[in-house]
Image (cartoon, rainbow, N blue to C red):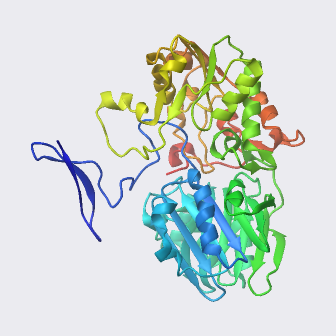
Amino acid sequence: MSDEQLIGGQGQEAAKIVRSGSGEATPLWTGRYYNEGHTGQDSFMDKLGEECGVFGVFGHSEAASLSYYGLHALQHRGQESAGICVANGESFHYHRGMGLVKEVFNNDNLAPMTGSASIGHVRYSTSGESKLANAQPLVFKYRGGDLAIATNGNLTNAPEIKEQLEKEGSIFQTTSDTEVVAHLIARSKQNDIVSAVKETLLRVEGAYAFMFLTKDKLIVARDPHGLRPFVIGRLGNAWLFASESCAFDTVGGKYYRDVEPGELLILDFKTGAVTEDRFSPIKQRAICAMEYIYFARPDSDIDETNIHSARKRMGRQLAIEAFVDADIVTGVPDSSISAAIGYAEQTGIPYELGLIKNRYTGRTFIQPSQELREQGVKMKLSAVRSIVEGKRVVMIDDSIVRGTTSLRIVNLLREAGAKEVHVRISSPPFANPCFYGIDTPSRQELIAAVKSVEEIREAINADSLHFLSHEGLLTAIGRPNVEVNRGLCTACFDNRYPTPVPDEAALGCGCD
């Protein structure tokens, strides 16, 4: 029988080891925590990498505590690090750490964080390395005083700006895009922070939802295309800001409206005033379609469209486009459940829990043998044999990235006795990388970029395969048909990027 021992300590590299009967020590992870240096690639589930989440408070005496609970609600957007910075009108208090919100914060480090304004962040590294220096909010000192910045998104021209700044003498402490923005603000010749922020935002390109905190102001901004979601809420007289509206429900707040693309909001400590301003006119609206398909929580609303309802409509549209005679419909938990329900309602085929998610696996930190790796999906999912055995199964999923996970899940259903497995995907083929804050593989690794639908079907061992059409997706999401592409970014499906994008060969997928 093996025994486990945790070695290491304060200021040391800690490693969890398992001592076999022979006394040999086998390291399971190195570093101070098991996912240090995590690259976003899961050896078992090749789903798209999460983005980041931001939460802000202005005008509430318990700003830090509200941010703590708000970040809990946004934990699905990033599990790598968490941080909160609070301002009281005179000074900052902040704390950041690697890991989940509940692991980073406790009563001891939250208690000193007094103040009526705060910004918080949960991170998934789409740009920069996985290390504490890159955890947000990033906090800086410059000639105007203290400045804290939290953002969700990715700046497509950050590398070239950084290179220019370094030539001019700037020294960078992190590998995060966000520090580029801080340097631009610090080097601005504008006399006030609001003007410096405006000038800076006009220089950067890409997708972003920014929060800037000084000792006497909170400044909020969203990119001119509205690529990343960003919403405003109210809690009594306090103002709330979040990546998703579900965070408002958690703290007892209510949705007020979305931050408009190109909008700049200035909240002043001294006067309590909220000034609505702009740093840019609205450009072609292009909210990320993958928020509706996969990323956002089902109980969130984006641009006044409920995510669960939109996903059900995707499932219904998928059934209209690709009906197949079957015995049961099942969804891959959790993001595909809503679409599976919609497919079942449209066809009359019973919806069943044919796949169950194990919610206590956490991130995978061991590197097993290839044989065990192929079986590793069972750590995350289990097929319910009594439900699928002898049945013709329609398996609904939200996307296919590399195809490896789809193959494993199809085989999981077959091993549980499914007679047929028909795969239906509630989005078009994902054939192009994202440069706006989603961790995606390179184009060559995306199976839809190199294989036809029939070739993908063979590769994942399905009896049939169908993707939701592009027009079907737009119809299902249900945004008004008065803007280009209904105001959505679908570049990952159609290769039409709303902003200039970098050379893929030089920058990879935009998440390194």
Give the percent coordinates (x, y) of residue 244.
Answer: 69, 54
Give the percent coordinates (x, y) of residue 310.
Answer: 76, 38
Q: Foreground: 258 or 264?
A: 258
- Residue at image location 71% in from the left, 15% down from the top: 323
Residue 260 is at least partly visible in this image: no
Give the percent coordinates (x, y) of residue 181.
Answer: 61, 68
- Vertical arrangement, residue 276 with respect to residue 36, above or below: below
Residue lying farthest right?
482
Residue 277 occupies quadrant: bottom right
- Vertical arrangement, residue 190 with respect to residue 328, above or below: below
- Vertical arrangement, residue 87 with respect to residue 422, above or below: below
Residue 208 is at least partly visible in this image: yes
- Residue at image location 60% in from the left, 77% down from the top: 86
Residue 122 occupies quadrant: bottom right
Tell whether 174 sits left or right of 84.
Answer: left
- Residue at image location 67% in from the left, 68% down from the top: 56
Tell whether 136 sits left or right of 60.
Answer: left
- Residue at image location 53% in from the left, 28% down from the top: 355
Q: Foreground: 511 or 229?
A: 229
Q: Quadrant of the N terminus?
A: top left
Residue lying farthest left?
22
Tell whether 76 sits left or right of 30.
Answer: right
Q: Foreground: 103 or 287?
A: 103
Q: Report the number of discs.
A: 0
Give the percent coordinates (x, y) of residue 394.
Answer: 62, 19
Tell whether 281 sits left or right of 172.
Answer: right
